Amino acid sequence: VVGSSRNARSGAAALISGGEINGNSAQDGGGLYTRGPLTLTNGTLFSNTASSQGGALYVYSGTVASVDHSQLISNSAPVNSGGGIFSAGPLTLTNSSVIGNIGEGVYNAQSVLLVAGGLISDNTGAGIDNDAGVAAITGTTLMHNQAGGIFSEGVLTVTNSFVISNSTANALNGAGGIASIGGQVNVISTTISENANSGASGAGGIYIGNASALINRSVISGNTGGGIQAFS
């Protein structure tokens, strides 16, 4: 679908398999906006733009969405609005690529986010921004994101993943790898390596600010700006 944003209305279930949604624009959900259950499989959302939230995909509050084996590439939205995905409903992202979006790769707005497998890279915002939600990241690679790999102000668990070569210039409370502010973070069997923080404070690897943390069987190495910093 070229030049026309798709809209799944409230209560209507949408199943989209294959195909490409590209070159569209809207206030919310430049490529795809959903207020009903959504399953997207083997799709590509490319070069879509939102003036408000969700460059490629906008998931309305409380709406359940699943994205599987799909690519969300080079979409755009304002900062803190999800250049790739803005989701205010439960979202499962499986074996998908979220690459080169302007803004965050995935923005979880006070909801539940499950990411299993795939690649989140080269986004101008954080790879994942967990805003007062619950996020579980498993078997996923986050790399070359420009406002850190993951920024979380909620409950975050990262397992069997790679958070590598991300960067941030955040002057306060930032991290090249993972920043957890005022919530809870669990990092298990994960590699956090070669991330960088050029800001005045924060950490290269993991920054923990007024949050509870569990770090288990993980590798924190080669980060610029410190491996782990914890403040209360």
Image: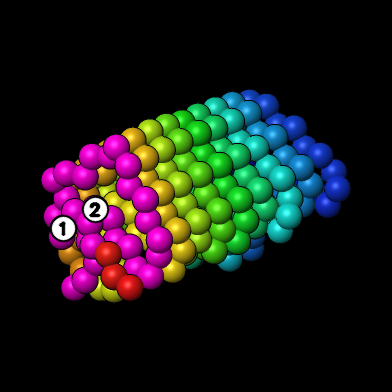
Residue assigned mark 1: 226
Residue 56 rendering spot, x and y as whole percentages: 56, 48
Q: Is the residue marked by circle 2 packed among few (<14), some (14-19), or many (20+) residues within 10 Å?
A: many
Residue 196 rendering spot, x and y as whole percentages: 19, 55
Residue 45 visible here: no
Q: What colour-coding does the image apply?
A: rainbow
Figure check: 150 above or below 231? above
Q: Residue 99 or 132: which is nearer the viewer?
A: 132
Residue 48 rendering spot, x and y as whole percentages: 55, 49
Classify residue 110 by image quadrant.
bottom right
Q: At 71% across and 58% down in the image, what residue appears?
A: 61
Magenta-colored stretch includes residue 214: yes
* Amino acid under disc 2: Gly
* 82 on left or right of 125: right
Question: What range is drawn magenta here?
Answer: 200-229
Residue assigned mark 2: 205
